[in-house]
Image (cartoon, coloured by chain):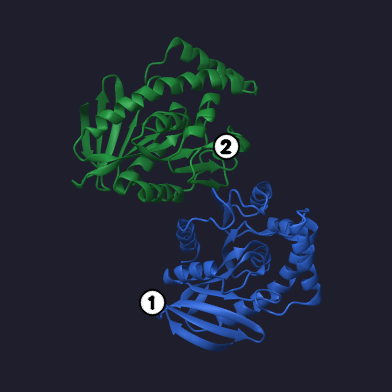
Chain colours: A blue, B green
Amino acid sequence: MRVTSEQCLDDGVLEREFTLGEIPGTLWMPESAAPAPLILMAHNNGLPKADARLVARARHCAAGGYAVATIDATGCGDRPRSAADEQARAELRRAFQADEPADNVFESYIGPLVEHAVPDWRTTLDALLALPGISGPVGFSGWTAVGIRVAVVEPRIKAAAFFAGGYVPRASREEARQVTVPLLFLLQWDDEGNPRQRALDLFDTFGTREKTLHANLGGHTGTPWFEVEDGNRFFDRHLK
Amino acid sequence: MRVTSEQCLDDGVLEREFTLGEIPGTLWMPESAAPAPLILMAHNNGLPKADARLVARARHCAAGGYAVATIDATGCGDRPRSAADEQARAELRRAFQADEPADNVFESYIGPLVEHAVPDWRTTLDALLALPGISGPVGFSGWTAVGIRVAVVEPRIKAAAFFAGGYVPRASREEARQVTVPLLFLLQWDDEGNPRQRALDLFDTFGTREKTLHANLGGHTGTPWFEVEDGNRFFDRHLK
């Protein structure tokens, strides 16, 4: 892991940009020296790690005593995309503009994106836990489909907070039965592009015995800020 | 209002039993002298005010800086029941034992119970707000059907936290459209006697623009304790 920049932010959080091979990442940590539990934080559908909403969540979480890391995994954010990815994205745009059902297109774009992203997240997890100042246990926050896979294959993940607003491939919806860590599932009740019933069905599917759904009125980007605070308290219950 | 007993509890809460005409009630308040916002707290379906789960919630809420009041309204708890009430309860028991659909029986029992309970809660609200040490604004917690009516007719109610686990008469489900205060709706995902879809439909119906659903895995009485703390924080956002 190579740190490419480092700055102290005014909320007592240390922000580091890093690269790990071809993976660019950002790590936020409290400036205090005590070892902090780690939270992996990702947007649904591979949005860029520099997105302002993700950065705000990550900084708030770090100020609450966590090491928070995000990356642009293969094909995500500003990383180069394969010809197949570019074709799938073009097809997705076309389907949206034509107001066609986009499920099959989503499946062929997001499915491989998840498959390729998971190994990068696991590589990042290994590297981060080797750093001084970062301890287990580990939480996962955000991208549902990647989080399902990571939670199933990584026993170091002890709690997960997923955002329902993103396409979850069929294979991931099946795999959700195998998720057994405590779970907070966050839903926007009127999310334009993500059917409510599908999210409720997915909540029902998760195999964990300890799961909570938080749903708020409003569209995809309307999550109230108090949910960020609720997310911190959820992780406090399970990681601290 | 006549105070019939008073004791200081070990969590710094003052507990008073009172009567208001024929209405018996309990009031919990922080011992400190500062005026506290008021929360009216009731079980669904008129369960007794002395129920241990309600008392635990009320004391926690009072320790967080609220005046919390509960009553046995007409026909509720240990209050005398009319011949019609007794007959409806007997019919309800019979329907349960025979495993028959109980909706119509619930309607004929809970409908009038709600109608009769609401005036007692309003009388109590008037009396409590006249006491020193209790200020508005006012919140309502618990019994959905009574809370819907009280929130619609009482502009002093500024926030409501309802528990979905109770029969909500058809008229109340209609009236839910008129609820416009911020709302927290608490659902047990596998509540044996209360259909999940009906609760989700009711959440959808509430007219307020600021509403949050919290759903947890488990049966009717399985609500996790952290929801009591979340309830306090919800009221903190709107009443303090």
Query: Does residue A147 appear to the left or right of A27 in the view shown?
Result: right
> Outermost residue toward the front?
A97
Front residue of B141/A216: it is A216
Which residue is found at the position 43% from the left and 32% from the top?
A: B147
Amino acid under label 1? Asp
Which residue is found at the position 36% from the left and 34% from the top?
A: B155
Front residue of A191/A202: it is A191
Q: Percent position (x, y) of residue B169?
A: 53, 25
Which of the chains bears the disc numbered 1? A
The residue indicated by pointer 2 is: B199
Q: Percent position (x, y) of residue B214?
A: 52, 47
Which residue is found at the position 80% from the left and 58% from the top?
A: A104
Which label sits on residue A10?
A: 1
Q: Quadrant of residue B1?
A: top left
Front residue of B49/A170: it is A170
> Looking at the image, can residue A16 be seen?
yes
Distance CA(mark 2)–CA(mark 1):
44 Å
Q: How many marks?
A: 2
> Looking at the image, can residue B25 be seen?
no
Amino acid under label 2? Ala
Q: Percent position (x, y) of residue A62?
A: 46, 72
Which label sits on residue B49?
A: none
